[in-house]
Image (cartoon, rainbow, N blue to C red):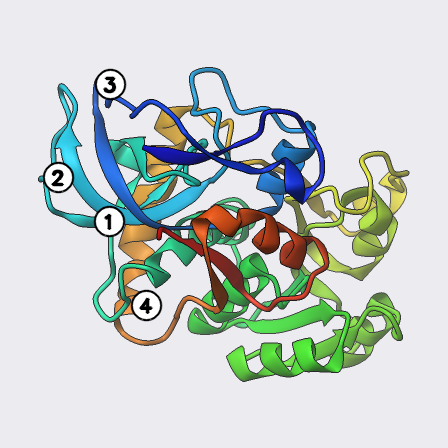
Amino acid sequence: MHAITIPEPGGPEALVWDEVPDPVPGEGEVLVEVAAGAVNRADILQRQGFYDPPPGASPYPGLECSGRIVALGPGASGWAVGDEVCALLAGGGYAEKVAVPAGQLLPVPEGVDLVRAAALPEVTCTVWSNVFMVSHLRPGETLLVHGGSSGIGTMAIQLAKAVGARVAVTAGTKEKLDRCAELGADILIDYREQDFVAELKAATGGAGADVILDNMGAQYLDRNVRALAVNGRLAIIGMQGGVKGELNIGALLAKRAAISATSLRARPLSEKTAIVAAVREHVWPLIEGGHVRPVVDREIPLPDAAAAHRIVEESGHVGKVLLVRP
């Protein structure tokens, strides 16, 4: 088969379409013939040499895919050859085939085509696990999403609205904020021109956000704590703004607030299986009912993954950039 390899870390040009051995499904795994994958920030970090795959994972980038099952490994159950699926991966999505633990598979939702289903696994699992399983967003509460026009952001807006929450977003252009509004965002904040703490407080009568989904890390830590409501929950899922920040514990105590920080890729199989099961139970009906949809900016041939990485690095997209198998 062919896959995108990274012979040496570097810029987008470091991604090489090459012939590699076919994967062999192990115990409890299935072999998926990939129809499409999607680009995530973690893939860019891996390409740059900053985010190695977990032990035992495929060395090729790609944290999600869609496709058809072509073989079952020993002990794999609940699926059949020919099933159309999408999958949460620890790596290997930028390839023609990938071996996947059966517990990390999801059926392609009714009403979503096979290629666009590749936009779903990583964002639905990330948002549901952080916003709902960890931070317990409830109807009537306010969620602040940083990077509202990203793949994660566009899914977070839709899921929060579907459960009856109010949604605030930050984004860097009017066009991106308009797209967020189309998805249901109620409070639109241009982080380049506006102070998100002040804008959020003004829009909520001084209360702030009950839950904040943050991809920035250190750069936003102090302001996020100030933006939280009493009993608020801050969920950190990224470090685009740095890894070390100063935390005002007094402010956190005064608000009886909580901070969580999670990553998905390196979690044990049992945790990923539980998250995928929860997504299938709670999110898939919303997708099949037309309340939530994948947001796809564009589709690029898989061998041209370098072009897709440039788009994502420049934040020149809304939603997901897909890599489609030729």
Mark 4 burial class by Cα count in 10 Å: few <14, some 14-19, many 20+: some
Circle 3 SS class: loop
- Whether label 4 touches label 3, CB < 8 Å: no
Mark toward the viewer: 4 or 1: 1
Relative placement, left or right, of 68 versus 190 is: left
Residue 78 lies, in percent from the top left, at 12, 37
Q: Are marks 3 and 2 in contact (CB under 8 Å)?
A: no
Q: Which residue is mark 2?
A: 79
Camera sees residue 84:
yes
Say which of marks 3 and 2 sits in front: 3
Q: Secondary structure at mark 2?
A: loop
Pointers 1 and 2 in contact (C-beta within 8 Å): yes
Q: Amino acid at mark 2?
A: Trp
Residue linked to disc 1: 85
Badge 3: residue crowd in 10 Å (few <14, some 14–19, many ≥20): some
Cα separation between marks 1 and 3: 18 Å
